[in-house]
Amino acid sequence: MILGAAEVGYVEMMAETVTAGDPTYTGPLAGVSLGLPVYHVTEPEVRENADASVYQDQIGVSEIAMETEPIWTTVRTIRERTPGTP
Amino acid sequence: MDLHGKKVIAIGERDGVQATAIAAVARSAGAEVLLELNQCFV
């Protein structure tokens, strides 16, 4: 699962939903732990795998407007507490 | 993490990076994109 949201709160909610389950307990994934590996598109793990020119064309401008560090920290924290996530 | 050969779900956001862009990046890394959709938080 690769996310593109720009706000830390949105990223956290989506990442939590596809790993441990819907944290708001309002949707169909409440209590459903999918345990999917989740990344944000700006994370080095994604960028290093991608074609550099495609990445720059598609993500470069959007990335400038984002506070990426807190997003990365949030996604990594959620990933690390999900067993079996690479 | 090696994306080559992996199956990817791309969840974009209207005000962030959109799913088509995420999918293009994932494909350039050799991944297969199964689903791409955009969320809108307001």
Image: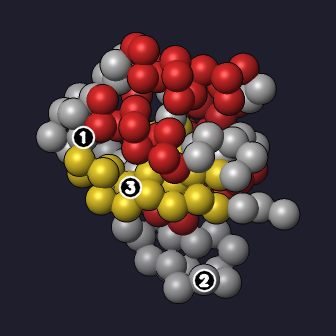
Can you tell which mark lies on residue B9?
3
Q: Is residue A81 visible?
A: no
Q: Is residue B5 visible?
A: yes
> Considering the numbered disc 1 on the image, is that residue within a helix, a strand or a loop?
loop
- Measured in 3D between alpha carbons, the distance from the residue under mark 3 to the one under mark 1, in whole angstroms, is 10 Å
Report x, y in % for residue A22: 58, 72
The reply to whether label 3 and label 1 mark residues of one chain is: yes
Residue that numbered label 1 is attached to? B31
Decide: marks 1, 2 in contact (CB < 8 A)?
A: no
Left or right, residue A75 beside residue B13: left
> Considering the numbered disc 2 on the image, is that residue within a helix, a strand or a loop?
loop
Q: Residues within 10 Å of mark 3 (few under 14, many from 20)?
A: some
The reply to whether label 1 and label 2 mark residues of one chain is: no
Chain letter of the residue carrying label 3: B
- Measured in 3D between alpha carbons, the distance from the residue under mark 3 to the one under mark 2, in whole angstroms, is 19 Å
Q: From the viewer's perspective, is residue A18 above or below residue B10?
A: below
Residue that numbered label 2 is attached to? A27
Q: Residues within 10 Å of mark 1 (few under 14, many from 20)?
A: many
> Who's the residue at 64% across and 80% down the image?
A25
Left or right, residue A17 beside residue B9: right
The single residue placed furthest to the right in the displayed view is B42
